[in-house]
Amino acid sequence: MNTQPGVEYVGDEACRTCHPDQYESFKKTGMGRSMSVPKPGGDGKEFAGPSAVRAERLSRVFESFARDGKVFHTGSQVDATGKKIFSETHELAYAVGSGDHGRSYLIVQGDSLFLSPLSFYTATGRWDLSPGVGTGVYRDFTRPATEVCVTCHSGLPQPVAGFANRYRQPAFRFLAIGCERCHGPGQLHVERPLEGRREADGFNPSIVNPAKLPPRQRDDVCIQCHLLGDARVLRPGKQNLDFRPGKMLDDVVSVFSVPPGQKGESFLTLGHVAQLQLSRCRTSGGERLACITCHDPHSQPRGDESVRFHRNRCLQCHTKKGCTLPLPGRQATSPADNCLSCHMPARSLAHIAHTALTDHRIPRRPSEGRALSSLPEPPTGLIWET
Protein backbone atom coordinates (compact mmCIF):
# COMPACT_ATOMS: atom_id res chain seq x y z
CA MET A 1 0.00 0.00 0.00
CA ASN A 2 1.05 3.60 -0.49
CA THR A 3 1.16 4.13 3.28
CA GLN A 4 4.52 2.33 3.46
CA PRO A 5 7.61 4.50 4.10
CA GLY A 6 9.40 3.69 0.83
CA VAL A 7 6.64 4.91 -1.50
CA GLU A 8 7.66 8.18 -3.17
CA TYR A 9 5.77 11.43 -3.65
CA VAL A 10 5.36 12.31 -7.33
CA GLY A 11 3.69 15.74 -7.35
CA ASP A 12 0.39 17.06 -8.68
CA GLU A 13 1.37 17.08 -12.34
CA ALA A 14 1.42 13.28 -12.28
CA CYS A 15 -2.20 13.34 -11.05
CA ARG A 16 -3.29 15.85 -13.66
CA THR A 17 -2.97 13.39 -16.54
CA CYS A 18 -5.87 11.21 -15.37
CA HIS A 19 -7.72 13.65 -13.11
CA PRO A 20 -7.69 16.99 -14.98
CA ASP A 21 -11.00 18.29 -13.62
CA GLN A 22 -10.09 17.65 -9.97
CA TYR A 23 -6.64 19.12 -10.60
CA GLU A 24 -7.94 22.38 -12.08
CA SER A 25 -10.61 22.77 -9.41
CA PHE A 26 -8.25 22.04 -6.52
CA LYS A 27 -5.68 24.55 -7.74
CA LYS A 28 -8.27 27.30 -7.20
CA THR A 29 -8.84 26.38 -3.54
CA GLY A 30 -7.04 27.89 -0.58
CA MET A 31 -5.01 24.72 -0.08
CA GLY A 32 -4.04 24.62 -3.75
CA ARG A 33 -2.69 28.18 -3.40
CA SER A 34 -1.18 27.83 0.07
CA MET A 35 2.36 28.83 -0.91
CA SER A 36 3.86 30.73 -3.83
CA VAL A 37 6.81 32.84 -4.91
CA PRO A 38 5.84 36.49 -4.26
CA LYS A 39 5.90 38.88 -7.20
CA PRO A 40 4.95 42.56 -7.43
CA GLY A 41 2.53 42.10 -10.34
CA GLY A 42 -0.56 39.96 -10.82
CA ASP A 43 -1.76 38.45 -7.55
CA GLY A 44 0.84 40.41 -5.60
CA LYS A 45 -1.29 43.59 -5.54
CA GLU A 46 -0.42 44.12 -1.88
CA PHE A 47 2.95 45.50 -3.01
CA ALA A 48 1.35 48.35 -4.96
CA GLY A 49 0.14 50.51 -2.06
CA PRO A 50 1.45 52.06 1.17
CA SER A 51 2.96 49.62 3.61
CA ALA A 52 4.58 51.34 6.61
CA VAL A 53 3.61 49.72 9.92
CA ARG A 54 4.85 51.13 13.22
CA ALA A 55 5.38 48.68 16.10
CA GLU A 56 5.46 50.97 19.13
CA ARG A 57 6.41 48.29 21.64
CA LEU A 58 9.40 47.27 19.53
CA SER A 59 10.38 50.81 18.48
CA ARG A 60 10.33 49.56 14.91
CA VAL A 61 8.88 50.58 11.57
CA PHE A 62 8.36 47.85 8.99
CA GLU A 63 7.86 48.55 5.29
CA SER A 64 7.22 46.59 2.11
CA PHE A 65 8.37 47.53 -1.38
CA ALA A 66 9.05 46.11 -4.85
CA ARG A 67 12.12 46.67 -7.01
CA ASP A 68 13.31 45.11 -10.28
CA GLY A 69 10.63 42.42 -10.21
CA LYS A 70 11.44 41.37 -6.65
CA VAL A 71 9.77 42.17 -3.33
CA PHE A 72 11.36 43.16 -0.03
CA HIS A 73 10.59 43.92 3.61
CA THR A 74 12.57 46.44 5.63
CA GLY A 75 12.69 46.77 9.41
CA SER A 76 14.03 49.96 10.98
CA GLN A 77 14.61 51.00 14.57
CA VAL A 78 13.47 54.54 15.27
CA ASP A 79 14.00 56.93 18.16
CA ALA A 80 11.35 58.99 19.95
CA THR A 81 11.30 61.53 17.12
CA GLY A 82 10.83 58.88 14.45
CA LYS A 83 14.40 59.14 13.16
CA LYS A 84 15.85 55.87 11.84
CA ILE A 85 18.76 54.51 13.86
CA PHE A 86 19.40 51.43 11.73
CA SER A 87 17.53 49.26 9.25
CA GLU A 88 17.78 45.85 7.59
CA THR A 89 16.21 44.72 4.32
CA HIS A 90 15.42 41.19 3.15
CA GLU A 91 14.11 39.80 -0.11
CA LEU A 92 10.94 37.76 0.32
CA ALA A 93 11.43 34.20 -0.92
CA TYR A 94 8.03 32.62 -0.26
CA ALA A 95 4.46 33.83 0.28
CA VAL A 96 2.57 31.69 2.81
CA GLY A 97 -1.21 31.71 2.42
CA SER A 98 -3.69 31.78 -0.43
CA GLY A 99 -4.58 35.44 0.00
CA ASP A 100 -8.19 34.61 0.86
CA HIS A 101 -7.54 35.87 4.39
CA GLY A 102 -4.00 37.12 4.01
CA ARG A 103 -0.37 36.21 3.45
CA SER A 104 2.78 35.99 5.51
CA TYR A 105 6.27 35.82 4.05
CA LEU A 106 9.46 33.84 4.50
CA ILE A 107 13.02 35.03 4.06
CA VAL A 108 16.08 32.85 3.46
CA GLN A 109 19.37 33.12 5.32
CA GLY A 110 21.78 30.39 4.26
CA ASP A 111 19.77 27.17 4.48
CA SER A 112 17.43 28.57 7.15
CA LEU A 113 13.94 30.05 6.80
CA PHE A 114 12.56 32.89 8.93
CA LEU A 115 9.16 34.58 9.07
CA SER A 116 8.94 38.24 8.15
CA PRO A 117 7.38 40.43 10.88
CA LEU A 118 5.02 41.95 8.29
CA SER A 119 1.89 40.26 6.88
CA PHE A 120 -0.84 41.37 4.49
CA TYR A 121 -4.48 41.06 5.62
CA THR A 122 -7.07 40.77 2.86
CA ALA A 123 -10.11 41.86 4.92
CA THR A 124 -8.67 45.34 5.45
CA GLY A 125 -6.45 45.44 2.38
CA ARG A 126 -3.45 46.57 4.39
CA TRP A 127 -0.25 45.45 6.03
CA ASP A 128 0.10 44.78 9.75
CA LEU A 129 2.31 42.82 12.13
CA SER A 130 2.48 39.07 11.64
CA PRO A 131 0.76 36.98 14.36
CA GLY A 132 2.85 36.94 17.53
CA VAL A 133 5.22 39.73 16.53
CA GLY A 134 3.64 42.53 18.56
CA THR A 135 4.21 40.68 21.83
CA GLY A 136 7.94 41.19 21.58
CA VAL A 137 8.72 37.47 21.74
CA TYR A 138 10.22 37.64 18.25
CA ARG A 139 12.06 40.73 17.08
CA ASP A 140 12.65 41.81 13.52
CA PHE A 141 13.38 38.87 11.19
CA THR A 142 14.38 36.32 13.84
CA ARG A 143 11.29 34.09 14.07
CA PRO A 144 12.24 30.61 12.76
CA ALA A 145 9.93 28.99 10.21
CA THR A 146 9.81 25.56 11.83
CA GLU A 147 9.06 22.20 10.25
CA VAL A 148 5.61 21.92 11.83
CA CYS A 149 4.71 25.40 10.56
CA VAL A 150 5.78 25.02 6.94
CA THR A 151 4.61 21.39 6.66
CA CYS A 152 0.98 22.46 6.99
CA HIS A 153 1.31 25.43 4.65
CA SER A 154 3.28 23.86 1.82
CA GLY A 155 3.35 20.85 -0.49
CA LEU A 156 6.50 19.02 0.60
CA PRO A 157 9.23 20.75 2.61
CA GLN A 158 12.67 19.19 3.06
CA PRO A 159 13.68 19.88 6.68
CA VAL A 160 17.08 18.94 8.07
CA ALA A 161 16.52 16.55 10.98
CA GLY A 162 17.51 17.90 14.38
CA PHE A 163 17.25 21.59 13.44
CA ALA A 164 14.36 23.97 13.95
CA ASN A 165 14.39 25.80 10.63
CA ARG A 166 17.14 24.43 8.38
CA TYR A 167 16.14 22.87 5.05
CA ARG A 168 17.78 20.92 2.28
CA GLN A 169 17.84 22.75 -1.03
CA PRO A 170 15.46 23.41 -2.55
CA ALA A 171 13.57 23.96 0.71
CA PHE A 172 10.34 22.71 -0.92
CA ARG A 173 9.94 19.95 -3.49
CA PHE A 174 6.40 21.22 -4.09
CA LEU A 175 5.29 24.68 -3.01
CA ALA A 176 1.53 24.55 -2.42
CA ILE A 177 -0.41 21.81 -0.65
CA GLY A 178 -1.18 19.12 -3.20
CA CYS A 179 -3.14 15.95 -3.87
CA GLU A 180 -0.76 13.75 -1.91
CA ARG A 181 -1.33 15.60 1.37
CA CYS A 182 -4.72 13.87 1.62
CA HIS A 183 -4.32 10.89 -0.71
CA GLY A 184 -0.79 9.87 0.28
CA PRO A 185 2.27 9.43 -1.97
CA GLY A 186 1.31 8.61 -5.54
CA GLN A 187 4.18 6.47 -6.86
CA LEU A 188 2.29 3.15 -6.74
CA HIS A 189 -0.88 4.69 -8.17
CA VAL A 190 0.99 6.20 -11.11
CA GLU A 191 2.81 2.94 -11.84
CA ARG A 192 -0.10 0.53 -11.22
CA PRO A 193 -3.31 2.60 -10.97
CA LEU A 194 -5.80 -0.29 -10.85
CA GLU A 195 -3.75 -3.09 -9.32
CA GLY A 196 -5.54 -4.65 -6.35
CA ARG A 197 -8.67 -2.52 -6.80
CA ARG A 198 -11.84 -4.12 -5.41
CA GLU A 199 -14.85 -3.55 -7.64
CA ALA A 200 -17.32 -4.05 -4.78
CA ASP A 201 -16.33 -0.98 -2.77
CA GLY A 202 -13.76 0.72 -4.99
CA PHE A 203 -10.93 0.24 -2.45
CA ASN A 204 -7.57 0.76 -4.13
CA PRO A 205 -4.38 -0.02 -2.14
CA SER A 206 -2.24 2.12 -4.46
CA ILE A 207 -3.83 5.38 -3.25
CA VAL A 208 -5.80 6.55 -0.21
CA ASN A 209 -9.39 7.77 -0.53
CA PRO A 210 -10.10 9.47 2.83
CA ALA A 211 -13.85 8.95 2.43
CA LYS A 212 -13.33 5.17 2.50
CA LEU A 213 -11.12 5.12 5.60
CA PRO A 214 -12.30 4.12 9.10
CA PRO A 215 -13.53 7.22 11.00
CA ARG A 216 -10.37 7.75 13.07
CA GLN A 217 -8.00 7.55 10.10
CA ARG A 218 -10.41 9.60 7.98
CA ASP A 219 -10.42 12.41 10.52
CA ASP A 220 -6.65 12.23 10.99
CA VAL A 221 -6.15 13.32 7.37
CA CYS A 222 -7.61 16.73 8.28
CA ILE A 223 -6.48 16.74 11.90
CA GLN A 224 -2.80 16.52 10.92
CA CYS A 225 -2.94 20.26 10.22
CA HIS A 226 -6.25 21.57 11.56
CA LEU A 227 -5.94 20.38 15.17
CA LEU A 228 -4.21 23.31 16.83
CA GLY A 229 -3.59 22.10 20.37
CA ASP A 230 -1.30 23.79 22.86
CA ALA A 231 1.58 21.31 22.61
CA ARG A 232 2.67 18.87 19.91
CA VAL A 233 5.04 16.09 20.98
CA LEU A 234 6.69 13.96 18.30
CA ARG A 235 7.19 10.28 18.98
CA PRO A 236 10.87 9.33 19.44
CA GLY A 237 12.67 9.32 16.11
CA LYS A 238 9.70 10.75 14.21
CA GLN A 239 9.23 13.86 12.07
CA ASN A 240 5.91 15.44 11.14
CA LEU A 241 6.31 14.27 7.55
CA ASP A 242 6.39 10.64 8.71
CA PHE A 243 2.59 10.73 8.92
CA ARG A 244 0.86 9.38 5.84
CA PRO A 245 -2.88 9.41 5.11
CA GLY A 246 -4.39 6.07 6.04
CA LYS A 247 -2.19 5.69 9.12
CA MET A 248 -2.83 6.85 12.69
CA LEU A 249 -1.60 10.35 13.45
CA ASP A 250 -0.88 9.31 17.03
CA ASP A 251 1.82 6.97 15.74
CA VAL A 252 3.80 10.08 14.78
CA VAL A 253 2.76 12.93 17.08
CA SER A 254 0.61 13.51 20.14
CA VAL A 255 -1.31 16.77 20.45
CA PHE A 256 -2.21 18.09 23.91
CA SER A 257 -4.55 20.93 24.88
CA VAL A 258 -5.34 22.83 28.03
CA PRO A 259 -8.92 21.89 29.05
CA PRO A 260 -11.44 24.35 27.54
CA GLY A 261 -12.79 25.56 30.89
CA GLN A 262 -9.30 26.49 32.04
CA LYS A 263 -8.84 28.74 29.01
CA GLY A 264 -11.71 31.02 29.99
CA GLU A 265 -14.96 31.63 28.18
CA SER A 266 -13.50 32.65 24.84
CA PHE A 267 -14.48 30.55 21.86
CA LEU A 268 -11.37 31.92 20.19
CA THR A 269 -9.09 29.66 22.20
CA LEU A 270 -10.37 26.60 20.32
CA GLY A 271 -9.61 25.56 16.76
CA HIS A 272 -12.04 24.06 14.26
CA VAL A 273 -11.41 20.46 15.29
CA ALA A 274 -11.94 21.08 19.00
CA GLN A 275 -15.04 23.16 18.28
CA LEU A 276 -16.58 20.43 16.13
CA GLN A 277 -16.11 17.93 18.97
CA LEU A 278 -18.44 20.15 21.06
CA SER A 279 -21.15 20.26 18.40
CA ARG A 280 -24.40 18.36 18.91
CA CYS A 281 -24.23 17.49 15.23
CA ARG A 282 -21.08 15.53 16.06
CA THR A 283 -21.92 14.18 19.50
CA SER A 284 -25.41 12.96 18.59
CA GLY A 285 -24.32 11.45 15.28
CA GLY A 286 -21.26 9.65 16.58
CA GLU A 287 -18.42 9.49 14.08
CA ARG A 288 -20.58 9.95 10.99
CA LEU A 289 -20.02 13.71 10.83
CA ALA A 290 -16.60 14.45 9.35
CA CYS A 291 -14.90 17.49 7.88
CA ILE A 292 -15.61 16.16 4.39
CA THR A 293 -19.32 15.88 5.20
CA CYS A 294 -19.53 19.64 4.69
CA HIS A 295 -16.27 20.50 2.91
CA ASP A 296 -15.32 19.38 -0.59
CA PRO A 297 -11.51 19.34 -0.59
CA HIS A 298 -11.45 19.54 -4.40
CA SER A 299 -13.40 22.77 -4.74
CA GLN A 300 -14.07 26.02 -2.92
CA PRO A 301 -17.44 27.57 -3.79
CA ARG A 302 -17.70 31.32 -3.26
CA GLY A 303 -20.43 33.91 -2.82
CA ASP A 304 -23.98 32.79 -3.56
CA GLU A 305 -22.65 29.46 -4.82
CA SER A 306 -21.13 28.85 -1.39
CA VAL A 307 -24.45 29.58 0.33
CA ARG A 308 -26.28 27.08 -1.88
CA PHE A 309 -23.53 24.48 -1.53
CA HIS A 310 -23.45 24.55 2.27
CA ARG A 311 -27.23 24.77 2.60
CA ASN A 312 -27.48 21.57 0.55
CA ARG A 313 -24.89 19.96 2.82
CA CYS A 314 -27.01 20.86 5.84
CA LEU A 315 -30.12 19.43 4.19
CA GLN A 316 -28.40 16.07 3.72
CA CYS A 317 -29.08 15.51 7.42
CA HIS A 318 -31.85 18.00 8.20
CA THR A 319 -34.44 16.75 5.75
CA LYS A 320 -37.26 15.84 8.16
CA LYS A 321 -36.97 18.88 10.40
CA GLY A 322 -35.69 21.95 8.65
CA CYS A 323 -35.20 25.52 9.81
CA THR A 324 -37.87 26.73 12.26
CA LEU A 325 -37.26 30.38 11.42
CA PRO A 326 -40.09 31.82 9.27
CA LEU A 327 -39.22 32.42 5.63
CA PRO A 328 -39.02 36.25 5.95
CA GLY A 329 -36.43 35.81 8.70
CA ARG A 330 -34.38 33.43 6.59
CA GLN A 331 -34.54 35.83 3.66
CA ALA A 332 -33.28 38.64 5.89
CA THR A 333 -29.84 37.09 6.19
CA SER A 334 -27.11 38.28 3.87
CA PRO A 335 -26.87 36.38 1.58
CA ALA A 336 -30.50 35.26 1.87
CA ASP A 337 -31.45 31.86 3.29
CA ASN A 338 -27.93 31.29 4.57
CA CYS A 339 -27.75 28.53 7.20
CA LEU A 340 -24.22 29.53 8.20
CA SER A 341 -25.15 33.09 9.19
CA CYS A 342 -27.06 31.73 12.20
CA HIS A 343 -25.51 28.34 12.88
CA MET A 344 -21.84 28.91 11.99
CA PRO A 345 -21.25 32.65 12.48
CA ALA A 346 -17.82 34.10 11.88
CA ARG A 347 -16.19 35.63 14.95
CA SER A 348 -13.16 37.88 15.10
CA LEU A 349 -9.85 36.51 16.33
CA ALA A 350 -8.26 38.53 19.11
CA HIS A 351 -4.83 36.97 18.59
CA ILE A 352 -4.70 37.32 14.78
CA ALA A 353 -5.41 40.79 13.45
CA HIS A 354 -8.16 41.40 10.89
CA THR A 355 -9.18 37.74 10.81
CA ALA A 356 -12.39 35.86 11.58
CA LEU A 357 -12.98 32.19 12.33
CA THR A 358 -16.17 30.26 11.60
CA ASP A 359 -17.81 28.77 14.69
CA HIS A 360 -17.66 25.01 14.16
CA ARG A 361 -19.69 24.28 17.30
CA ILE A 362 -22.76 24.82 15.06
CA PRO A 363 -24.97 26.38 17.75
CA ARG A 364 -28.74 26.24 17.31
CA ARG A 365 -28.83 30.02 17.76
CA PRO A 366 -25.92 32.46 17.31
CA SER A 367 -26.16 33.60 20.94
CA GLU A 368 -26.28 30.08 22.33
CA GLY A 369 -22.54 29.35 22.35
CA ARG A 370 -22.04 26.76 25.03
CA ALA A 371 -19.95 28.12 27.90
CA LEU A 372 -16.61 26.35 27.87
CA SER A 373 -16.35 26.40 31.66
CA SER A 374 -19.48 24.22 31.88
CA LEU A 375 -17.72 21.33 30.19
CA PRO A 376 -16.54 18.42 32.34
CA GLU A 377 -12.84 18.62 33.10
CA PRO A 378 -10.44 15.68 32.87
CA PRO A 379 -8.50 14.65 35.99
CA THR A 380 -5.15 15.64 34.45
CA GLY A 381 -3.85 19.05 33.49
CA LEU A 382 -3.84 18.46 29.73
CA ILE A 383 -6.21 16.80 27.30
CA TRP A 384 -4.66 14.23 24.99
CA GLU A 385 -6.25 15.14 21.65
CA THR A 386 -4.77 12.47 19.35
Image (cartoon, helix red, strand yellow):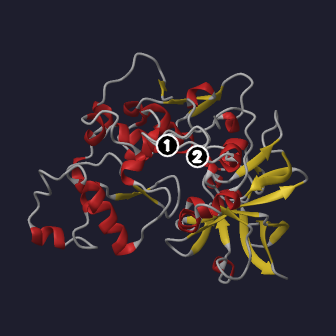
In the image, is 84 to the left or to the right of 238? right
- Amino acid beneath label 1: Pro
The residue lying at 38 percent from left, 73 percent from top is: 303
Q: Position of residue 6 (x, y in %)?
A: 75, 34
Residue type at the position of mark 2: His
Quadrant of the image containing the N terminus: top right
Q: Secondary structure at mark 1?
A: helix
Q: Which mark is residue 210?
A: 1
Q: Earlier in the sequence, mark 2 or mark 1?
A: 2
Q: Nearer the viewer, residue 34 or 203?
A: 203
Could one spot residue 137 in this view of the protein?
Answer: no
Label 2 and label 1: CA atoms lie apart by 7 Å
- Regarding mark 2 in the picture, which secondary structure is present there? helix
Residue at point 47%, 43% (across, down): 202
Label of residue 183 in the image? 2
Q: Where residue 380 appears, x then y in whole percent?
A: 45, 17
Q: Nearer the viewer, residue 80 or 330?
A: 330
